[in-house]
Structures are given as C-alpha cells and as structure tokens.
C-alpha cells in the first residue's frame, strides 16, 4: 500500500492572506499546506479521500493519472469543493467516477453540484456513480475498507481504515466502540488543528494522547492550522513515534 498526503492543512492553513506570523511567512516547504486530502494506492486500486478546493492542484502535483474512487469523510466545503475536477478522470478513463459517501453527504453534494445530478445533462459535466456508506465495511474493486464514525462537534464524520492504515480527519471525539475498529493499525493519522482548545477538532495534546492510547507503530498528524506553530519547532515537542505530516509525504506500508 502506498499513501500520499495530498494536503495536510485547513481553510486556516498557509498562507493566510494578510497574516505575518512565523508560519505564514515560513520558507520551510512543510509549513505550506493545501487543504487536507489523502491518496491511497491499495493493490493497484487508486483512491482519494476528500476533494477539497485544492483537488486539481494536488492531483497534478502528485502526478496521479488514474483514479478509481473518491471517498468523502463529510460535507464541509473544504473537503468537497473540488469534486467538479473529477471530470478530467472521466475523460481519461471513459467511465463514471464511483463516489462513496453517507446519505447526508450525498444530499449536500446534490445541492452544491446540482448540474451534475440534473435530468438535463450538459455536455462535459462530471459523471459520478453514487455509493452509500452505512457504517458497515465495504469494497472498492475488491479492496476492503472499514468506515470509522467519529464526531466533529455534533456532526458525524467518517474516517477510514485500509488494512493496517487508518485515516481520521475533522474529529474531536471517538467512541470506545469505534476505537476498537482502529486498534491494531500500524499507522494512524489524526487531525491536530492547534494547541488551544477547539469546539470541533482535536488539539495537539489531545491527538498525541489518543495516539498513545491507540499505540500505533507510527502516528501522523494532519489538518494543521497555521496557529499550531512551525513544523520544525512542533516536531521537537512530539513523542518519537508521532510526526507532523506534510504535503507530499509518501508512505509505503
């Protein structure tokens, strides 16, 4: 399995217009983050989790010329706004793009991208095939994936487990039942927005504490705000088996 972090930031990521903080003016490439998304190549099947506003730029930057499915964690705009750009893969692959999302997310997509789902189909619009996630394990071209329901304040969000790799973003609570689905993962990714308390995201300390509880061989932190601090400095505060992720980081598991 190959993983590429397409983006590790937030809509309050880097650069922030008008902000002159150390992170926003940093020349360290690890401090320059597009909106959070991840690419997973699983036994030859190429999957992207979330298509934020930077989706096109991310896919061009990573040189991903085949895409077999898109999974959506939730319906917030910073995770869905780039869905229109799957049309390039429709053109190249000559088929509809399988989309996997819970019913509520599908309803939001139908609102925001009404032209894609209208009865009158304008030539050249994206073509998608909707698949409904219910919380049960599912397959994409024979590859098994386990959805993990987490809470983003009061909003249910899906994380996903691919074999020994678990990816969770936009969360501030995970039930004991859902933690059981994560345990045993060799690599876990969690969101860590900032050091200060937040209503809907894990803080740095909360994410690190949960990593220690789940005890993966390696942990990575994503969905990072510019408020968290410089990559180099924050990295020195982390346990040996936990790292800040950065855009373009690749893993082979």
Image (cartoon, rainbow, N blue to C red):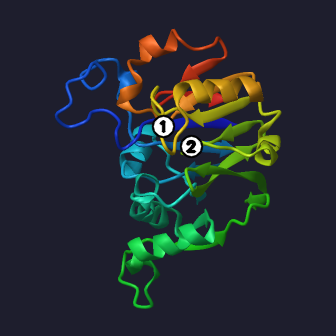
| x 57%, y 20%: residue | 243
Q: Position of residue 52 (x, y in %)?
A: 42, 52
Mark closer to the chain start, 1 or 2: 2
Q: Which residue is mark 2?
A: 169
Residue 96 at least partly seen:
no
Q: Which residue is mark 1?
A: 223
Please tell me whether residue 249 is drawn above or below residue 235 in the rendered image.
below
Residue located farthest toward the top when viewing the structure as drawn: 236
Q: Position of residue 247 (x, y in %)?
A: 45, 31
Q: Position of residue 65 (x, y in %)?
A: 49, 49
The quarter of the image holding the C terminus is top right
| x 48%, y 33%: residue | 197
Depth check: 197 or 17 in front? 197
Tell me whether circle 1 and circle 2 mark residues in contact (CB < 8 Å).
Answer: yes
Classify 10 Å Cα crowding around label 1: few (below 14), some (14-19), many (20 and above).
Answer: many
| x 57%, y 24%: residue | 205
The quarter of the image holding the N terminus is top right
Depth check: 63 or 214 in front? 214
């Amino acid at each position: 399995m190959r993983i590429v972090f397409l983006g590790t930031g937030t809509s309050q990521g880097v650069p922030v217009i008008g902000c002159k903080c150390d992170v926003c003016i940093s020349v360290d490439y690890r401090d320059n983050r597009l909106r959070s998304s991840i690419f997973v190549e699983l036994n030859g099947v190429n999957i992207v989790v979330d298509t934020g506003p930077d989706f096109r730029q991310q896919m061009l930057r990573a040189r991903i010329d085949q895409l077999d499915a898109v999974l959506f964690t939730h319906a917030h705009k910073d995770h869905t706004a780039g869905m229109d750009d799957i049309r390039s893969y429709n053109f190249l692959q000559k088929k509809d793009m399988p989309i996997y999302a819970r019913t509520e997310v599908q309803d939001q997509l139908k609102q925001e991208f009404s032209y894609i789902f209208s009865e009158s189909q304008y030539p050249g619009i994206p073509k998608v095939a909707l698949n409904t996630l219910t919380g049960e394990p599912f397959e994409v071209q024979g590859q098994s994936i386990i959805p993990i329901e987490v809470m983003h304040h009061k909003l249910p969000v899906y994380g996903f487990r691919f074999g020994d790799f678990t990816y969770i973003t936009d969360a501030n609570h995970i039930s004991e039942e859902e933690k059981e689905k994560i345990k045993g993962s060799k690599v876990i990714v969690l969101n860590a927005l900032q050091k200060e308390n937040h209503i809907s995201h894990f803080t740095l300390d909360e994410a690190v504490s949960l990593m220690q509880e789940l005890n993966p061989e390696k942990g990575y932190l994503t969905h990072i705000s510019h408020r968290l601090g410089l990559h180099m400095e924050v990295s020195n505060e982390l346990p040996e088996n936990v790292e800040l992720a950065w855009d373009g980081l690749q893993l082979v598991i």
